[in-house]
Image: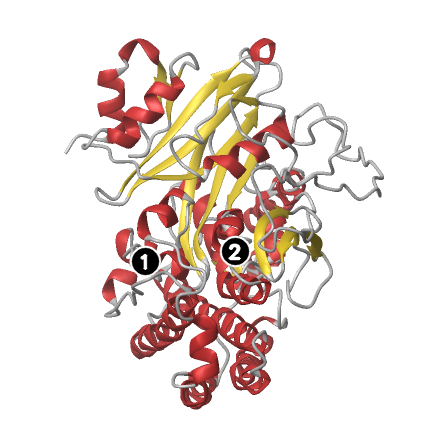
Amino acid sequence: MARPLDIVRAKFADEVLGVNEAWPEGPLVVKKDRIHEILAFCKDNPDLSMDFLMDIAGVDFLGQDPRFEVVYNLYSLIHKHRLLLRVKVPESDLALPTATDLWKSADWGERECWDQYGVVFTGHPFLRRILNHEDFVGHPLRKDYPVEGRQVLKETVDYDISRQGLEQSDGVGNFVEINMGPAHTATHGTLRSKVLLDGEIIVKLVPEIGYLHRGFEIMSEQVPYQHVIPYTDRLNYCSCAMNNTCYAMAVEKLLGIEATPRAQRIRVIIDEITRIIDHCVALGVNAMDMGAFTNFWYAFWPRELAYDIFTKLCGARLTTAYTRIGGLSNDLYDGFVDDVKGFNKALNEAIGDIMALLKKNRIFNERVRDVGMIDKELAISYGFTGPNLRAAGVEYDVRKAHPYNGYDQFDFDIPLGEKGDTWDRFFVRVEEIRQSQRIIEQAMKDIPGGPVMVSDYKIALPPKSAVYGSIEGLMAHFKHIMHGIEPPVGEVYGLTEAANGELGFYIVSDGGPKPYRIKVRPPCFYYYSAFPYLAEGSFIADAVVVLGSLNVIAGELDR
């Protein structure tokens, strides 16, 4: 089958300005005039079938004309192919038509692009700031916005929820407005939702984010490539190592290298342990929201053992920063295999306890079955990936669809749900823990020998013996410390299957030692955008349960 970029190029030859042939996904650079028609073609043409709009990224090429670009990240579930569409947008006409009529994920994606870069999406139903405060002046990811340009904004913005067309059930009572969050035990993070209630029923819900927005992307553009790794820890802080791996692999793709075989295998083991403990958080907290506090302790005990392993491995419990571009910071320690076996044993006991407590528990069943349902088509349109997408019955897992780090060598299944309700989201994660255990057991059997870091001194620091024993080693060390890694000019999208779904880093390099542009594709961002759909019409108590089942992590959501 022809590549997606070739199909689009053949159909819209007059609109194409250029193409990057380095990767199958492009990007393909197009004019802005017919972008909506091109996007609709990508979605509807059977040879393309781009049913996912995975993400939207803005880029500011200050000093060039046109100055701005908007990058659409499209993916086809059927064909398993991807297309990056780059659209040139001049500063004098900084507007594009909205794609919200094609994909629901465009809603928040376009809001973020407008908030950070000032690109107007005409026809958008609710184009307002999303990560920055409503009174923020300017667009902070533009290259001419000062990095130190802080604005102290303390006033709470109150959403005006329209009541047009709404009627109270009793005909005389008043609707009640309440805030869920941003500081409430039920939100498990700095998430705020303005809720309009009719009795106990949610008739409208407007989510607001940005309370934990720390400017991850602009910070990452100020430091050398290796220095970004600790920042990635702070995205989904329940599964830090997976963020490290995804970022490192994206830069390695830009460099045209791969980590050593031993490093790849260790990454698999550590990432799967991390996936398990992330799921343990989701399971423990979700049931605790319904009063099952004992379940919280069942789920969190294995996490403690995993943290002991991480501490021995790299000296840190939570924010590990273990991965390096080109490999790992250090090799496994003596006793690692036995510790992982002990972790697996404790995990088996914990899962057994959780299943015994909840699987046939009447209260639990009535709280989660048919609650917060979403069907396949809507889940795809909202940009769901990971366990929440698989709970809706869609078999998409990056480890299977686009294997990396040797995942195609392991035998494991993709658990699927049927209804996309809270029950399915809970038990898909339970089964994914078991599948991760299978992967770990297989990966531990034949860990390759050799180094855990590539030997190219342009990417890895030379050993101390070379630094102190040769002028070449000393110079390589000096160059690496002073100039860092300098990938060639270009751009890539690197992705992995993180605990919450497809995690991606779109990176633009200008050939310098720092990333010119980094855009994260956070799975939580698109989950939370669907919260109104999942919660409206349900009881307020159900909204708490639904939110917990989505496992939205504020650090990743806000970045």
Q: Which mark is residue 399?
A: 1
Q: How many marks?
A: 2
Can you give x and y, in whole percent of width and height, for residue 437 in the image?
36, 77
Q: How far across and how far down the image is residue 386, in percent? A: 39, 57
**C-alpha distance separating marks 1 and 2:** 31 Å
Q: What residue is drawn where x is 48% and y is 39%? A: 506
Q: Nearer the viewer, residue 148 or 390?
A: 390
Q: Which residue sits at x=34%, y=19%?
A: 37
Please determine whether, in this image, residue 520 is positioned above or below residue 324.
above
**Amino acid tagged 2:** Ala
Q: Check residue 535 in the rendering and tell me which mark sits there, or answer none.
A: 2
**Mark toward the start of the polypeptide (1 vs 2):** 1
Left or right of 257? Residue 306 is right
Q: Is residue 391 above or below residue 556?
A: below
Find residue 379 and report its horizontal and vertical position in percent: 38, 50
Could you tell me which residue is drawn at 75 percent across and 42 percent down? 158
488 sits left or right of 134 in the view: left
Between residue 559 and residue 327, name the one nearer to us: 559
User: Would you identify the image quadrant in which residue 491 lies?
Assistant: top left
Q: Is residue 44 left or right of residue 233?
A: left
Quarter of the rendering occupied by the N terminus: top left
Q: How is the image coloured?
A: secondary structure
Question: Can the viewer see residue 235?
Answer: no
Q: Residues within 10 Å of mark 1 (few under 14, many from 20)?
A: some
Where 414 falls versus 171 (above or below)? below
Instruction: Tell me whether circle 1 and circle 2 mark residues in contact (CB < 8 Å).
Output: no
Characterize the local packing of mark 2: few (<14), some (14-19) or many (20 or more) Cα atoms within 10 angstroms. many
Which of pointers 1 and 2 indicates the residue nearer the eye?
2
Give the residue at the far left of this rendering: 1
Please name the amino acid that badge 1 sits on. Answer: Arg
